[in-house]
Image (spheres, rainbow, N blue to C red):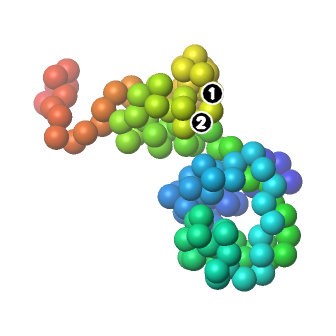
Amino acid sequence: MSDELRSAELLDLLGLADFVRLAETYGGRRLYVPASGDDTALAKDLGPTAAKKLARRYSGTQIRVPLARELRARQYREAGASNGDIAGRLGITETGVDKLFRRMPDKPVKGSRDPRQIDLFSNN
């Protein structure tokens, strides 16, 4: 199964927040999913709800957890993180972050997305 398909499947199963937490914690590694989602390292790392969802779908198997760098970079940018912060969280260089954003079809806006700030250049 391709990594893109696996990412979409995991994202659909877990939802955005839990998928990002999974990628941050286990991205790039194989992960054994225990039959029970309770009282496991997985439940401690992701929370019992996400661990149970994984257990129901992948019980007793190993999955390859994607790095999901593009999705995570987009999330971090939307939260107002700088390229330096994003680079540190993704384990890549700032130049790598620049390249990642350049390749995205709908590039997220650089800078803060704080709703309390006014947009000086809007036509409104």
Rendered position, 37 above or below 123: below
* Residue found 47% across the figure and 25% down from its top: 84
Residue 5 vs residue 113: left or right? right
Residue 73 pos. (x, y %) = 53, 37
Q: Is residue 20 above or below residue 50?
A: above
What amino acid is found at the position of numbered circle 2 in the picture? Leu
> For the residue labelled by badge 2, is the local secondary structure a helix, a strand or a loop?
helix
Position of 17 with respect to 110 (left or right) is right
The residue lying toward the viewer, choosing from 38 and 15, is 38
Residue 92 image label: 1
Disc 2, disc 1: CB below 8 Å?
yes
For the residue labelled by badge 1, is the local secondary structure a helix, a strand or a loop? loop
Please state the horizontal and vertical placement of residue 38, each as a whole percent of the image. 64, 82
Splitting the image into 4 quarters, where does residue 42 fall?
Answer: bottom right
Residue neighbourhood size for the residue with mark 1, other residues' Cα within 10 Å, grouped as few (<14), some (14–19), many (≥20): few
| Residue identifier under label 2 | 90
Left or right: 89, with 60 as reference point: left
For the point 69% across and 53% down, which residue is it?
A: 26
> At x 59% / y 70%, what residue is drawn?
44
Quarter of the image that includes the C terminus: top left
